[in-house]
Amino acid sequence: AHYMMGLALLQRHDFAHGLKELDKALDLGRGANPKSYMVEEIWQALAKAKYMEWEYASSQRSWRLQCLKEACEKALEIQNAVDTSQSEITELTSNSHKEQLETLQQVFSKAAEDDTPTEVPDYLCCKLTLDIFRDPVITPSGVTYERAVLLDHLKKVGNFDPVTREPLEQHKLVPNLAIKEAVQAYLKEHGWAYKMD
C-alpha cells in the first residue's frame, strides 16, 4: 500500500510525500523478506524518484550559480575598468585582474563539485555487485555485502563467504549500520549516485 501510494504521489510530482511512502515501503519490505522481488522494485522506484529530485534541484543550483558567476565577472570587469581609468594600465593591474578571474573560476568550480558525477567510493559499494549499498550486512570475517545478493549466493552456491571462503550461515549476518549511514550521507550530498544504469 505504501509503495502504491508513493508511486501515485510521484505521478502528481509530490516528491517529498512520495519519497516518504517509498522509504516506508522499503523498510517494511526488507523486514518481511529482504530477497523479495518487491524490495528490488521499490528500491528502483525510490532511486529513480530521488535521482529525478536531485536532477531538478541540481539544475536550479546550476542556473543560480551561473547567474551569480556572470554577475561577479561583470563586477570584476567594471572594477578593472575603474582601476585602469584612474591610473596607468600596468602589467601588475592586468595580472591582478587575471588572478581575480582565475580565483572566481576556482570558487565556482568548487561550488559545482557535489553536482558533478564521479566514481562512488569503493567502501560504499558491494564487493559482488560493485553497486552502491542498499541494505549492507557484515559477515563474521568482517566483509560487507549487499544482503539480497549474499543471501542469493548462500542459497545457490553454498554456505561460505564469497571472498574469504570461510563457512557462513545466514543467521550470522549482521546489518552494517555504519556503512548504511555512510551511504545515506553520501547519497544526500551526491544525488547523482542514485542513477541506475
Image (tube, helix red, strand yellow):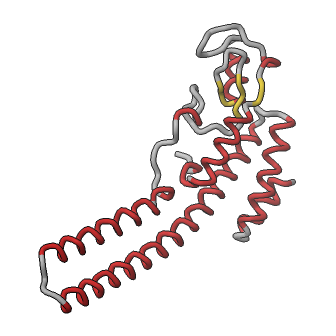
Classify residue 18 by image quadrant: bottom right
Q: From the viewer's perspective, is residue 40 above or below residue 35? A: below
Q: Image check: 10 left or right of 97?
A: right
Residue at 78% over, 59% down = 6
Residue 45 place in picture, x, y as percent: 68, 52
Residue at 31% over, 81% down = 76
Residue 176 place in picture, x, y as percent: 72, 31
Q: Image check: 172 left or right of 72?
A: right
Q: From the viewer's perspective, is residue 39 above or below residue 160? A: below
Residue closest to the eye, 87 or 58: 87
Residue closest to the eye, 179 or 150: 179
Count of marks placed on residues: 0
Residue at 58% over, 67% down = 57
- Residue furthest to the front: 87
Q: Image check: 124 left or right of 35?
A: left
Image quadrant in which the N terminus is located: bottom right
Classify residue 167 by image quadrant: top right
Residue at 67% over, 30% down = 146
Residue 119 place in picture, x, y as percent: 47, 43
Residue 20 place in picture, x, y as percent: 79, 58
